Amino acid sequence: MSKALVYGDSINTDLVIAGKYTKTLNFQDLADHCMEDLDPRFREKVRPGDVLVAGCNFGCGSSREQAPLALKYSGISAILAKSFARIFYRNAINVGIPALICDTSSIRESDEIRIDMDRGIVTVNGEREIKCQALSPIMQSILHSGGLVEFLKEKGDFTL
Amino acid sequence: MGKTFAEKVLGRAAGHEVSAGEIVIVRPDFCVSHENGAAVVKTFRKFGVPSVFDPSRIVLVMDHTVPAATAGNANSQKTVRDFTHEQGITHYYDLNSCGGVCHQIMVQEGYALPGCIVLGTDSHTCTSGAAGAFAVGIGRSEMASVWAVGDIWLRVPETIKIVLKGSFRPGVSAKDLILRIVGDLRADGADYKSVEFHGDAADRLCLAERMTLCNMGIEMGAKNAVFKPSEEVLVHARARAKKEDWEVLWADEDAVYCREFVYQLEDIVPGLACPHTVDNYATVREHIGMPVDQVFIGACTNGRLEDLRLAAQVLRGRHVAVRTIIVPASCEIYRKALDDGILAELMDAGCVISHPGCGPCAGVMGGILADGEVCVSTANRNFKGRMGNRESFIYLASPLTAACTALNGALSDPTEWAKEARI
């Protein structure tokens, strides 16, 4: 079961992973400090498959790709937000973690979340459905391949 | 129908006319990375291609943790250094007297050129728009893929037009203006958008001021921010250009904008971004007298010679009341400030001059605050924990506000100083 971990607006990438922890190529080290300055209990709360839910402008600030990586290696399976800062949005898709734009205002902490990627529908607590904004075809293809590196290794270039 | 700057640059690079909303595949003129180049190298290896698409288009600058503070930093830098040798990348700025913050290097050394496309694995890559380039921040996997295949997909952004009129009052500067603009548009006001600066005042702003404004475009979410090149910018570009084929591109008179804003510079007053977001705008007057523990003057936002000179004007012959850290944005600036006597004046006033680089701004190279301490900083971010301690408080301000504050140990209004100094 995926449950929702809910945060607010304009969560910046320094809060997702502080600069002092970014100087590593070991992604598990990133997960150990993920969200620490915003929510020191994040590490205890998160379970594999959980969904991070936020308000507007999620991932603003630094372009650090360690931010979506830290979330991914913490076990977060998807991020839902009312809007994303553009660099984070690209980075998330590029490392193969779905970043979906939808109206998150009714989602509460620990709600059960199911995501149908093909239909672009989020189901909350098995009853309520929320429609997501469609990803551009190129982003869909990248996500479908599991990330940008996998996509380009498979296709060779950006021709869809 | 006319075209915006973004539509013109991306249209030229794509080889056909384009409009906002379209996806284009383009080849960048220059790609810049700093120490995170080590991670780019690691991802690049996964593509299994032996060489980068064009070594002459790749720029690598060591700036975040120089000199290396940990074995990890040193190893990352070695990875990048070895890669430049392996791939024949000559645009490499190691720890030596030619280096500096990558965004400063891009403009100073002539990589940011009018009409060119610059990609960088740092969100403040938008700084290069000051030189008339289309400069966009991207992530590390994205850069690795550009190194491997030479192309990137970009959505042609809609554009926000910001018209600047008139002149600043004494004691007020470009930093005060951009703090006000970010406060008005908010942190996501320009998300996915291109920002163009227009107007008689924009035309008159010097390169250093343009860099301060474009640098903080990302703080309102912008994909890029740009000025039409002035004569000063063109003279600099001709003298230092690292490639021959560049031309000035600019928006048509009848280009279509999604939003327009007008700022009369006489209305701008010394401003602040209060903790813990850059769009948390206040005037200096609202917090005047607030006790401060540390002042930081530098970073890619405000570490240029013009900024250091202003600080020295305030501090000359006087003494700071709090810890004051000065970080020139590049070694060239450091050297000029040394030759001009600016550094001596700042040292005589009690400041510490640190080596060029990202310095305390990113919380990875010293200048970390104690619990509960307050810093007035000329950098571009005041996020919680940004300077290395989540229990500290960062107020962003102009170099003049920072210098006046350093003198008094409490937040101070530089327009008062300007009146006394008759500037």
Image: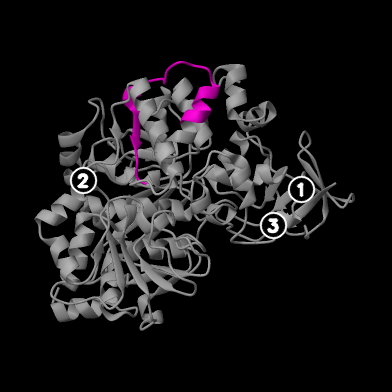
How many callouts does the rendering have?
Answer: 3
Q: Amino acid at mark 1?
A: Asp
Q: Give the residue pinned by disc 2.
A: B230
* Above or below B317: residue B34: above
- How many angstroms separate mark 2 from mark 3 (CA)? 50 Å
- Tag 3, which chain? A
Q: Secondary structure at mark 1?
A: loop
Query: Residue at 42% across / 21% down in the picture?
Result: B52
Q: Give the residue pinned by disc 1.
A: A50
Query: Residue at 20% across / 77% down in the picture?
Result: B319
User: Is label 1 or label 3 in front?
Assistant: 3
Q: Give the residue pinned by disc 3.
A: A42
- How many angstroms separate mark 1 from mark 3 (CA)? 11 Å
Query: Residue at 27% across / 53% down in the picture?
Result: B355
Q: Which percent across, then down, holds residue B305? A: 19, 55
Q: Quadrant of residue A10?
A: bottom right
Direction front: furthest residue: B71
Q: Which percent across, then down, holds residue B310? A: 20, 65
* Above or below B375: residue B43: above
Residue in front for this viewpoint, A89 or B199 = A89
Q: Amino acid at mark 3?
A: Phe
User: Is label 2 or label 3 in front?
Assistant: 3
Residues packed near mark 3 inside 10 Å, few (<14), some (14 to 19) or many (20 plus): some
Task: Decide if residue B135 is on the left or right side of residue B407.
Answer: right
Residue in front for this viewpoint, B211 or B326 = B326
* Above or below B219: residue B147: above
Please give the range of residues in magenta: B41-63
